[in-house]
Amino acid sequence: MSAAASNADFLQAMAQSSRERVARARATCGDGALRALAHAADAAPRLELSPLGFDLIAEVKRRSPAVGQLDNRGEDVGARANDYAIAGAAAISVLTEPTRFDGELSHLREVTAALKGRVPAMRKDFLVDPYQVYEARAAGAGGVLVILRMLEPAQVAALLETAAEVRLFVLLEAFDETDLRFAATLVREYGARLRLLVGVNCRDLSTLHVVPGRLETLATSLPRGIPCVAESGVESGADAARLARAGYQMALVGSALMRTGDRIGLARDLLSAGRQCG
């Protein structure tokens, strides 16, 4: 099987699992009722970027398919998110995918409750249906991830329209130049009414390994005039500095923060190093 086929199979499996979760959730709470809950939820804090020039999306991720378990199952995810906010993270990413990442939608609710409106939480999942955007907003989220490679343009448009409706920011995740061209088109179409970020994930989904140098290679194709996010493989202040020099304004960091014994210290090191070189 080729790498491209393996990549597609992984995303297709994740999309199918996601569709099955939506079907189960709909049987309990219909679209109209969930939409009402989303609109009734307390407003999420806006995503505010620092004038110092480099920002961090810090991630709560219990498991990584690439490296295995990242926390003990009894960990207080709200306390972790609180530490990230204390360290200066601009947003907290929360994995809610259950089959490969041990995530739960309840983790998003716990994180948003712990943050008390200081910074927004972002639902990170394999979203396929506007229903899941409403789920995110009803749980308190201020943003969602949208994986461009996994979706048809009409599906992306439906997710973005719903995000605009409930005032969520969106991180558009790209893997290559084709994805980045699509992201640039979406920025032109939606940027005036929706807060967008463009992220580059340097993980090869056929192997789940980080591809060295991919972030720098794709930096030349980043859309201009919008915050761009380096995703995966950011482990240290040196990495943050290198990527800031390459042209990224933000980094999304999960596994490194989950594994360290000093998550506040590492988060601050990432920010300091990126801001010195941004």
Image (cartoon, rainbow, N blue to C red):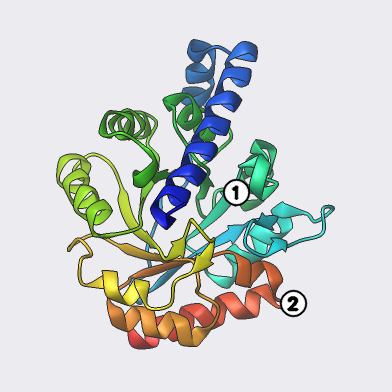
Sooner in the amino-acid sequence: mark 2 or mark 1: 1
The structure residue drawn at horizontal position 48% and vertical position 11%, both measured from the top left corner, is: 32
Q: Provide residue 101's location: percent of width, then percent of height.
A: 65, 49
Q: What residue appears at the point 50 percent right and 40 percent down from the top-left corner?
A: 126
The amino acid marked with disc number 1 is Leu
- Classify 10 Å Cα crowding around label 2: few (below 14), some (14-19), many (20 and above): few
Question: Where the C terminus falls, by quadrant?
Answer: bottom left
Q: Residue beneath label 2, please?
A: 261
> What residue appears at the point 58 percent right and 72 percent down from the top-left corner?
87
Image coords of residue 224 (percent x, y): 17, 63
Label 1 CA crowd tier, 10 Å (few <14, some 14–19, many 20+) = many
Q: Is residue 144 left or right of residue 75?
A: left
Tell me the tag on residue 142: none
The secondary element bearing badge 1 is classed as: strand
In the rendered image, which residue does mark 1 sit on?
Answer: 95
Q: How far is disc 2 from disc 1 in space, using C-alphas?
A: 20 Å
